[in-house]
Image: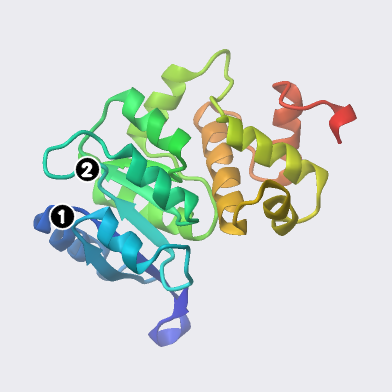
Amino acid sequence: MSTARGGQTEIAVVVIDAQDVVHVGLATWLTGSVPPIKIAANYADPADFMSTYPAATPLVDVVLFALQYDGQRPNFPALRQLCQAGHRVIVYSYLIAEEVILTCLDAGAVTYVSKFERGTHVREAIYAAATDTPYVAPRMAKALLNDRRVGRPRLSQREREVLVEWFKTESKERVAQRLFIEPSTVRTHLQRARSKYAAVGRSAPTKSALLARALEDGILTVKDL
């Protein structure tokens, strides 16, 4: 994040979408946002973005990813590549099938916003992604709620691994070293786990609260610590 005029922190967003109207619409919706949001670049294809930004960079705080290109099926492989590179990705798509939403979250997306939802959800999702806080838009909340078992969120295997390692150490950097991933990827997994707990009514905003949830759900035991 950079500092804009007036001393406010400016969030740099890159939009990856094949539809020009989406680029124009987002620029209009985000104009005048406080704190300010700047569209740093627009891409029509994820491969073009990855060729420019093969790894997470301070120049890009958040990536808005359309998921579907040229009428093709959802491009989950590209989404996984973006997330594995350490980018904070918000999927912004017309697709609203719950399985699609859940697959995107499992692939590493920070959150999912439907293009049928109000523009305010996009703005709030961007703020959340840039500050490592959870945000759950209505369609994502519905998918997570329908997927739960007795209030338990569906955490991916990687999310569980990151949680366990984080509870054993004092820093996200150490977790990254142990799991051979980037610190930004660790933050994304933790943020997404918090979002999933919030979606099922079991908010875990702090490390101690998240630890309590993990113990309740059997993700780890006291002996693991």
Q: Residue at x 71, y 54 (%)?
A: 177
- Give whichever of 27, 183 is nearer the camera: 183
Amino acid at circle 2: Lys
Q: Residues within 10 Å of mark 2 (few under 14, many from 20)?
A: some
Res. 157 visible in picture: yes
Using the numbered discs, state the Cα–Cα distance from disc 2 to disc 1 in whole angstroms.
9 Å
Amino acid at circle 1: Val
Q: Residue at x 72, y 45 (%)?
A: 207
Name the image quarter holding residue 203: top right
Q: Is residue 2 left or right of residue 69?
A: right
Query: As drawn, which residue projects farthest toward the top?
Result: 150
Element carrying mark 1: helix
Could you say where residue 201 lies in the image, as x and y percent from the top left? 55, 28
The earlier-in-sequence mark between 2 and 1 is 1
Element carrying mark 2: loop
The correct choice, above or below, for 27 with respect to 192 in the image is below
Q: Residue at x 39, y 53 (%)?
A: 124
**Residue at which label 1 appears:** 22
**Residue at which label 2 appears:** 115
